[in-house]
Amino acid sequence: MKTSQAAANVLHKQWGSEAVQQYIGPFDQSYFAYAADESIRVNAASGGVITAMLDFALSSKAIDGALVCRSVVIDGRVTPQFFIATDRETLLTAQGSKYIAVEFNRDALPLIRAFNGRLAIVALPCDLTNLRRLAEHDADIRRKVVLMVGLLCGHNSRSELTEMVVDKIKPDGAVLIDYRYRQGHWRGELEAYFDNGEVIRKPFSYFSDYANLFYFCQQKCHHCHDHAAYAADISIGDIWSLRMKENPIKHNAVIVRTGTGVALFNAAVKGEAIRAQSEAIEEICEGQARSMPFHYNVSARARAGKKLGITIKDSVQAPVQWHELLTARMALKNEKRSRGTEGMKKVARIPRFILKLKLYVMKGLESI
Ligand SMILES: Cc1cc2nc3c(=O)[nH]c(=O)nc-3n(C[C@H](O)[C@H](O)[C@H](O)COP(=O)(O)OP(=O)(O)OC[C@H]3O[C@@H](n4cnc5c(N)ncnc54)[C@H](O)[C@@H]3O)c2cc1C
Ligand code: SF4
């Protein structure tokens, strides 16, 4: 037995049906899947299922456009940009996860309103919930939006985190011209392109160590318990189960929720755009074993926040164990510490070995 498989067996959590219902919400089917077309997988966040499915929907005329998000660099700063792709070539420019705050209502809604045709929307859970609510009262949105694809989401980061990381790796005097958060297998690497021709590649941990410790976390995420995009027709995420680490093809976790989702996903599998294997929902949970229970437990953050002067409404009334309280306290404290220009400077000065140490402690607490 390979080492990571043995470790996976030891670390496997027990997922009760109540917990699954709370974390995942209503669903119909669950899969591990990947894009059949290798060229779609090259720049994908994970297995490229989102892009393969949207490409299939466009080419089979199930939709006229797909609202997606790319990152552009304006004046040396990474900026997320929503747009509507109507062909494969432009769709591909949106691949990869943008771990940077987005303004869906300000930037994406006007695009939806101005578009004349049927749309698939890709968005974070909070933005999809708002869109679903809006669609209930707005016939124009209801008519246009025919599919909602939700990203699984641990939390998102303020733009300052990206700026700090770019600043740390930037060659003297060079200006950033392109940036990718995560490329390649498993955790992958970040890639930064500069105007002097240099391309700097670093392990994704240069970014994710800060993000996983909740430095620069968006404050709205403290209040959120929706990890799995309850409002989506199809929710799609990564798989961080050790059993998948040695698989040469990175897969996506896929949760199909509604009739619309079932019809399109099954058609994309039948049309050989996506390869999918049915998996128990507990296997999807296992791929989010540490982040999902933490995310759901707003109660722990509400309690921890009291001592830190951060007011969080307890929207889930979940039981809070000692280790959950400690993890919540660490996360909130780190986020608070990273606020403002002074906060950014302080965090930038933390030595990497201290970051790693804090991360081991946090991961240990989350794994209990
Ligand atoms: C902030 C954030 C947090 C996440 N947290 C988790 C997590 O905790 N667990 C997990 O399993 N997965 C998480 N994901 C999702 C995961 O990183 C992948 O995006 C997902 O698995 C899709 O992979 P793919 O290969 O199918 O995507 P691709 O085929 O590469 O397509 C990615 C799609 O995502 C869209 N997109 C990227 N970033 C954003 C954004 N910020 N806002 C709106 N749309 C965007 C793009 O438009 C594109 O259509 C997160 C993503 C983001 C952006
Ligand atoms: S954690 Fe919740 S509020 Fe934060 S970006 Fe994700 S879905 Fe939105």
Image (cartoon, rainbow, N blue to C red):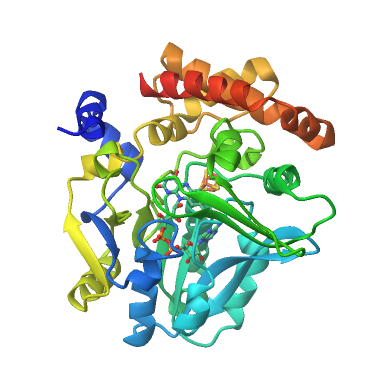
Q: Give the image location of residue 285, x and y in percent.
A: 29, 39
Residue 60 visible in the snapshot: yes
**Residue located at (48% from left, 25% from top):** 299
| Image quadrant in which you'd find residue 333 | top right
Q: Position of residue 232 (x, y in %)?
A: 39, 59
Image quadrant holding the C terminus, namely: top left
Residue for point 44% across, 85% down = 64
Q: Is residue 69 above or below residue 181?
A: below
Judging depth in this view, the residue of 20 and 51 nearest the camera is: 51
| Residue drawn at (56%, 34%) of the image | 209
Q: Residue furthest front?
A: 197
Asked whether the viewer can see residue 15, the reply is: no
Tell me where residue 276 appears, x and y as whole percent.
21, 61
Left/right placement of residue 344 relative to residue 121 reads: right
In front: 188, or 78? Answer: 188
Q: Give the number of marks.
A: 0
Quadrant of image for the N terminus: top left
Q: Is residue 358 above or below residue 234?
A: above
Percent across and percent down for residue 40 are: 39, 70
> Could you tell whether 273 is left or right of 42 in the image?
left
Quarter assignment of residue 45: bottom left
In the image, 115 versus 211, the foreground residue is 211
- Along the line of sight, which residue is nearer the eye, 293 or 94? 94
Residue at 59%, 74% (x, y): give it: 83
> Looking at the image, is 345 positioned above or below residue 105?
above
